[in-house]
Amino acid sequence: QVQLVESGGGLVQAGGSLRLSCAASGSIFSINAMNWYRQVSGKRRDLVAAITSGGRTNYADSVKGRFTISRDNAKNTMYLQMNTLKPEDTAVYYCNARVVVTPTRYEYDYWGQGTQVTVSS
């Protein structure tokens, strides 16, 4: 079994910064793509940023230039540095990872429990 645990959410004023972390643990052989999603209550869950195992990144247009996704493969941890936050960034942020597990070497999709980010105006 694999667990993803997010941390770093909270309340911040507009223009401020937060750094989210997502730590993976358990029966991990390797981790392929890792992603951050966010969801506002009653709306769909949207992709915010993605990073491959090799470090290639992709961002939603709404966060380009403000958010930076990164990962530490040795620690099985992913980060999201969020700068110049806006009230419209308020959401529950979820981490997602495609994990190759031991001993089967099968790949599965895992989700964290979510962390609330609230940006006040």
Image (cartoon, rainbow, N blue to C red):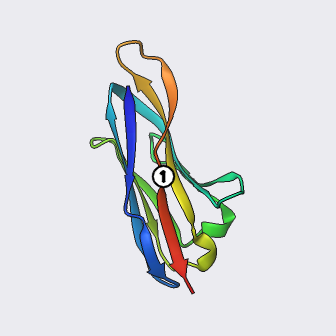
Q: Is residue 23 above or below residue 81?
A: above
> Which one is in front, 31 or 1?
1
Q: Residue at x 59, y 70 (%)?
A: 89
Residue at the farthest left position = 74
Identify the amino acid type marked 1. Gly
- Check disc 1: other Cα within 10 Å, few if <14, some if 14-19, many if 20+: many
Residue at the farthest right position = 43
The x and y percentages for residue 27 are: 33, 25
Q: Residue at x 47, y 34 (%)?
A: 32
> Which one is in front, 115 or 54?
115
Q: Residue at x 48, y 75 (%)?
A: 83
Counting every numbered tag in the picture gives 1
Residue pointed to by mark 1: 114
Left or right of residue 15: residue 42: right
Left or right of residue 105: residue 46: right
Residue at the farthest front position = 42
Which quadrant is home to the C terminus?
bottom right
Q: Secondary structure at mark 1?
A: loop
The x and y percentages for residue 109 are: 53, 31
Which quadrant is home to the N terminus?
top left
The x and y percentages for residue 42 are: 71, 57
> Which one is in front, 83 or 11?
11
Q: Is residue 107 above or below residue 94?
A: above
Left or right of residue 88: residue 101: left
Q: Residue at x 65, y 59 (%)?
A: 41
The x and y percentages for residue 12 are: 45, 79
